[in-house]
C-alpha cells in the first residue's frame, strides 16, 4: 500500500505483468519446494501483519499522522502541525525509515498463524512481500516469533512474475493472497489458474475498496480465508 490504487486494469497499461526483479529470482530458486504439493503464496502487510496500525505508531514519533481518506499513503500522510500532506517525493524515504525501525515489531493479523498452521499439512507456504530487501531477515524473524516461520521472499514491483515462477517450480495448485488489487491483477495475467484472494485486514481500508475484479474471494477474516483455501485444495484433489 504505497501509492494510489484502483481495482481496474487501465493504470497497469504499459507495465510488464510478468516482470521478475533480478534480486527476486535467486530467492525463489533457493527455496526448497516440493514438486506436486500445493503452494500458498501470501502477502505480509495487511494480510499476515498489521501494517497500518504499525505505521500509525511510527508516524506519531515523526510528528505525522495518517488521514485515511482513500486506499493510499501518498497524500494521506500529513504533518500534525500544519495539516499539510507529506510530498510524494518524500514518501519512499519515509517508508524506508518506517520499515527499518518497525519491521521487527509489527503485530500479527488475528487468526493468520492459526489458519496457516492448519493448512500447512496440505500445502507449502511462502511469504511474498514488498518489504525492502534489507529487511527481509527481520521480517522473517518477526513472522517466526508469531508462529509463522515460513520462507520469505522480498519482492519488488508487481507480483505476477514471482508467482508464475513459483507455480512453475511446484507444478501444483497455487493460492495467492494480497491486499493490493494491482498485484492480484498481475497474478491473474501471469498465472491464471492461481486461486486469488483479496484480503485486507484493516477494516477501515476494507471499507474503502471494492473486491478486486481479478480475485475469486474477498475477506478480512482468516477463518473465512482458511475455509476458502481448504475448499480450493479439496476441489483440486488435495
Image (cartoon, rainbow, N blue to C red):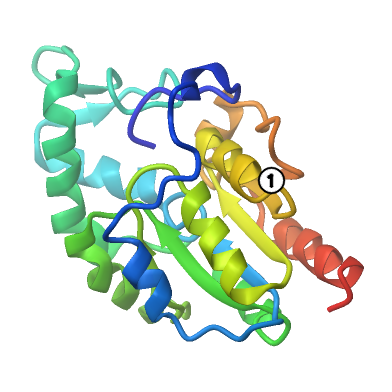
Tell me where residue 60 sits by quadrant. top left
Q: From the viewer's perspective, is residue 138 above or below residue 31?
A: above
Residue 181 appears at what percent x and percent y? 56, 34
Displayed quadrant of residue 67: top left
69 relative to 188 in the view: left or right = left
Q: Residue at x 47, y 86 (%)?
A: 32
**Residue at the (66%, 53%) spot, across then down:** 221
Q: The N terminus lies in which quarter of the figure?
A: top left
Using residue 64 as the reference point, say whether residue 111 is left or right of it: right
The answer to whether residue 12 is above or below residue 237 is above
Does residue 79 appear anywhere in the picture?
Answer: no
- Relative vertical location of residue 28 with respect to residue 154 in this rendering, above or below: below
| Residue 222 placement: quadrant | bottom right
Pick whichever, 72 or 205, lies toward us: 72
**In terms of secondary structure, where does tag 1 sit?**
strand
Residue on which the image places disc 1: 219
Residue at image position (62%, 81%) is 117
Amino acid at each position: 500500500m504505497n501509492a494510489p490504487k484502483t481495482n481496474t486494469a487501465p493504470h497497469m497499461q504499459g507495465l510488464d505483468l510478468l516482470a521478475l526483479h533480478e534480486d527476486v529470482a535467486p530467492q525463489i530458486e533457493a527455496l526448497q519446494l516440493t514438486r506436486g504439493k500445493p503452494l500458498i503464496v501470501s502477502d505480509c502487510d495487511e494480510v499476515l501483519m498489521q501494517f497500518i496500525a504499525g505505521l500509525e505508531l511510527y508516524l506519531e514519533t515523526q510528528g505525522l499522522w495518517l488521514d485515511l481518506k482513500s486506499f493510499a499513503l501518498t497524500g494521506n500522510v500529513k504533518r500534525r502541525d500544519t495539516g499539510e500532506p507529506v510530498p510524494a517525493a518524500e514518501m519512499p524515504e519515509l517508508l524506508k525509515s518506517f520499515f527499518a525501525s518497525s519491521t521487527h515489531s509489527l503485530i500479527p493479523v488475528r487468526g493468520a498463524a492459526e489458519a496457516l498452521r492448519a493448512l500447512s499439512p496440505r500445502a507449502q507456504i511462502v511469504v511474498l512481500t514488498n518489504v525492502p530487501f534489507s529487511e527481509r531477515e527481520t521480517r522473517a524473524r518477526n513472522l517466526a516469533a508469531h508462529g509463522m516461520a515460513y520462507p520469505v521472499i522480498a519482492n519488488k514491483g508487481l507480483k505476477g512474475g514471482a508467482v508464475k515462477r513459483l507455480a512453475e517450480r511446484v507444478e501444483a495448485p497455487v493460492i495467492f493472497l494480497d491486499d493490493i488489487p494491482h498485484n492480484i491483477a498481475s497474478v491473474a495475467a501471469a498465472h491464471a489458474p492461481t486461486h486469488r484472494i483479496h484480503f485486507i485486514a484493516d477494516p477501515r481500508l476494507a471499507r474503502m475498496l471494492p473486491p478486486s475484479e481479478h480475485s475469486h474471494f474477498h475477506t478480512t477474516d482468516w477463518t473465512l480465508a482458511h475455509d476458502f483455501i481448504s475448499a480450493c485444495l479439496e476441489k483440486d484433489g488435495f
